[in-house]
Image (cartoon, rainbow, N blue to C red):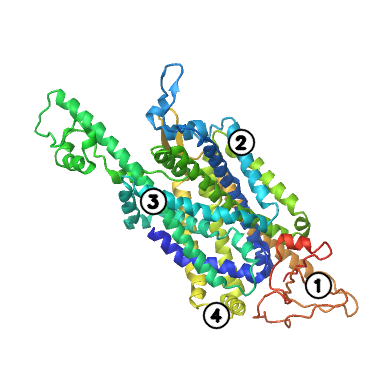
Amino acid sequence: MLLYVFLLLIVGVPLFFMELAAGQNIRQGSIGVWKHISPKLVGIGYSSCVVCFYVALYYNVIIAWSIFYLGNSFQYPLPWEQCPIDAGTNETVKECASSSPTQYFWFRKALNITNSIEESGEFNPIMTGCLLAAWAIVSLAMIKGIKSSARVMYFSSVFPYVVLFIFLIRGMLLDGAIDGITYMFYPKLEIWGNVQVWRQAATQVFFALGLGYGSVIAYSSYNPVHNNCHRDALMVSGINFMTSVLASLVVFVVLGFRAKNIALRCVAENLGVLNLMSSNGSSHRWWPSFNVTDPSSVSLSEYRQWYHELGSTLGPQLTDCNLEEEMNKGVEGTGLAFIAFTEVMALFPASPFWSTLFFLMLLNLGLSTMFGTMQGILTPLMDNFKLLGRHRTLLTVFSCALGFIIGLLFTQRSGNYFVMMFDDYSATLPLVIVVIFETISVAWVYGTDRFLDDIELMLKWRPPVVYKYLWKYVCLLAMVGLLAASLLRMVFKGPTYTAWNQTAASEMTLAYPGWALAMIVILIVFASLPVPIGYIHSVLKSRSALDIPPQEGPGPEVHRELYTKCNSTDQLDSNSHPAPCEEDGVRPRTSFLPVGNEQYRLLPQQEEEEGEEEEEEDTGV
């Protein structure tokens, strides 16, 4: 928690403010913003689009899983409450008996997972259908652009808070809830030396605020020019932090209850061993003062006190039943929602109601995230390619159809391993690279003083000078250090993943095979490649322009380094030429605010209503 707060303050808030201000000021998507700052930086916007597409691919698979669990929640008892019976032997299925009903349902019934990523297995037809439904929902919600998705997000943004508060109140009544909350707030300074923890905390900050995805820039480009984006940055970051605390409280309340149940089952098993040892004539010098024949009357603290005084000397057949160790084991990633929470909800009265409520909330959260992610893909493309902008519906349908086709990779029996691969590597490292280049573009290429001047013209007051040093040094050095440490860890330790072994009915850590490592490298390089390609293309284009022989005669006057951004409502006069904004020579220190009286960028629906004869005119540097 402390590490997350630290990164949120020194990296998250400054960069979130930077993206909000850039999008609101330049009034373009991620491609147009960086192209405006310098044509050589246009590749940053394309890299953001690629990262958004990566995230959309695997994130919609998680939505598909939520749809599957939501559909299975309308039955009593829930299918993951008890282990199934093998029809052949009339006994409990061995894999389930050796693990737990929730783990068995997740790994065997939902995913039907293979033992490793090297065993692809056939496609899962049920998950394929759920994935198709997920992409269809996203396509229908996005097909009308921002206005339609905003209507949906009114509900999808409020509903999860209601559910989280309900779960928190219900969870606080559970045995072990206080232990979970204590574990959450107990400082663990030793983890600050773990590079993996830093990378996960930074990824959470980026993902929570949408940094580097282009969606923040895309949405802020529709803000009024003089909107107080600094207030928005602080407010959204604060609300986001409080939401993270609320969600973390719910998670650790549930994990505390789960860990307490596991520890009490451990106590009951050890008391059974004590009874067996007593019946075999063992010495009673170590006999505890509590009633070993009634495990329900023995508290965890009583057993642990006896174990540390006498029980630990009786051999390895008795265990400590440490609650903190069970909390450390916990579960992470997708297992948190589909294993830990389902296990706890199965113990609630009226469990189908709680399960339906939880997965409906999860579905809403996933869809709201997908709307922002898809907007980070579609808006820049429509801004920079007029043909795509005129065929918005076709672009949306094509993007979703392409996402579904590529997403079939995740509906194989080994699909969960590819989800982990994309989550750990394809989005994380390229995202850090994109944000590094964004910071360099604003802080060093365009200049922090010029950027603060532009913000001052927007807000009518100048932001604190601390942002200058945060953008130029603190944020940049922190992200470069994080990227370097992550790459060194990948090289020397090698990427690994967690696999489910059907025979052992447990999880184990495996190294990626050679072809999977090559796939990871290709994904990272492909997402980062637009940056150097855009730079090289711009340089070559500039040189070719210089090689064009001059025309005979006076010719038109050429103004270099000029930028005139027109609004969707600006009218162009074909009989006149726009006056130059600045004299050629020194780069102007003026704002790049749009010209004209209109201070709003039109929503997609409004542009369509203006008619085909009024097309948005975009000019670049």
- For disc 4, the marked residue is 462
How far apart marks 1 and 3 lie (CA) works out to: 57 Å
Assess whether mark 3 and mark 2 are in contact (beta carbons under 8 angstroms): no
Distance between the alpha carbons at the discs numbered 2 and 4: 52 Å
Looking at numbered disc 2 in the image, what kind of residue is underneath it?
Thr
The residue type indicated by label 3 comes to Ile
Q: What residue is disc 3 on?
A: 169
Secondary structure under badge 1?
loop
Question: Of the residues tagged 1 and 3, which is closer to the observer?
Answer: 3
Answer with the quarter of the image where residue 378 lies: bottom right
The earlier-in-sequence mark between 2 and 1 is 2
Q: Position of residue 213 (x, y in %)?
A: 59, 58
Distance of label 2 from label 1 (alpha carbons): 49 Å
Q: Is residue 287 left or right of residue 215?
A: left
Q: Which residue is mark 2?
A: 128
In x, y percent, where is residue 604?
Answer: 72, 60
Depth-wise, is mark 4 or mark 1 nearer the camera?
Answer: 1
Circle 4 SS class: loop
- Placement of 210 over or under 325, stated as above or below: below
So how many labels did they put on this image? 4
User: Regarding mark 2 in the picture, which secondary structure is present there?
Assistant: helix
Q: Considering only order in the chain, which callout, 1 or 4, is on the residue closer to the N terminus?
A: 4
Q: Label for residue 571?
A: 1
What's under tag 4, amino acid-wise? Answer: Arg
| In the rendered image, the vertical position of residue 17 relative to residue 57, given as above or below | below
